[in-house]
Amino acid sequence: MHARREAAGLLLRIATPVLDRLARAACEAGCTVLLSDPDGTVLDERVRDGDRKDFHASNLAPGSDWSEGIEGTNGIGTCLAEGRAVTVWRDQHFRATNTGLVCMGSPVFGAAGELAGVIDVSSVRSDMTEGYARLVSLTVQDAAQRIEADLFRASFEGARILAAGGEDSVPQGVMLLALDRDDLVIGATRAARKQLGIEEAQIGRLPADDLFDRGRRAGGLEAAQRAEMARALARAGGNVSAAARDLGIGRATFYRKARALGLEV
């Protein structure tokens, strides 16, 4: 278990404040909040002291393996197997010992689009309604996307981060790109890769300009970059050289991109 937590050190550090916020609401409603690694092993939990015995009796505890191969259909293992958010309702669980649970899991994707783990909120309360479960599921998905965005930024510290969809989160997922000083794409989230057609072999070689036409079809890469440059200009009080330094690009590159994007400087 120690080795697994050590291997997931960055994920645990990034996830901690997000899990704490999620737990403030979920635990008061009698739920447990769990974070697993990509193999389905529970790394961390948030649970009220009075509820811990019930959840641990159901094997919802750090160190437990909730992969589909071990537990069958469940909120963690099925989420990993399908790569999407799931809600597993009581008797939908494979094992009879788990049919008292309602489990809402959402995958967390790493900086290269790989599965990094799962956030799961589970309840053993008999009064859990389907409507409330849907609300919890949306909250879990939002938390997972926040962790994904923070993981991406931490993995590309020092790079320029561009929100390719205009916002960190869109229905397709977290849409972020990492650009180097030469405006090459050195990183892209899973959703950005899928939506913009970026292949792994292109990472580190693909100029961001080549994505503009794709971005227009996908809903806003060009607009996002124009807005980013406008914000840099505003912060610099209209000084192009300062704005270019802020973005980590040369003054000539700033002027060229401004003209291409229709930004007055």
Image (cartoon, grey):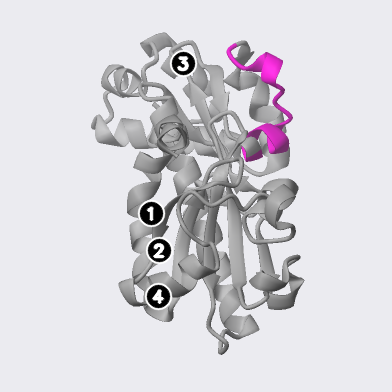
Cα–Cα gap, marks 3 and 2: 34 Å
First of labels 3, 2 by sequence position:
2
Is residue 226 highlighted in magenta? no
N-term mark: 3 or 1: 1
Q: Quadrant of the N terminus?
A: top left
Which tag, 2 or 4, sits closer to the chain's start?
Answer: 2
The image shows residue 128 at horizontal and vertical percentages of: 57, 84
CA distance separating discs 2 and 4 = 16 Å
Q: Which residues are magenta?
A: 191-204
Q: Which residue is label 3 attached to?
A: 180
Disc 4: CA contacts within 10 A as few (<14), some (14-19) or many (>=20): some
In front here: 251 or 199?
Answer: 199
Closest to the camera, between mark 1 and mark 4, is: 4
Q: Earlier in the sequence, mark 1 or mark 4?
A: 1
Q: Is residue 5 left or right of residue 96?
A: left
SS under mark 1 = helix
Q: Identify the residue at image location x=26%, y=35%.
A: 235
| Tag 3: amino acid | Asp
Mark 4, secondary structure of its residue: helix
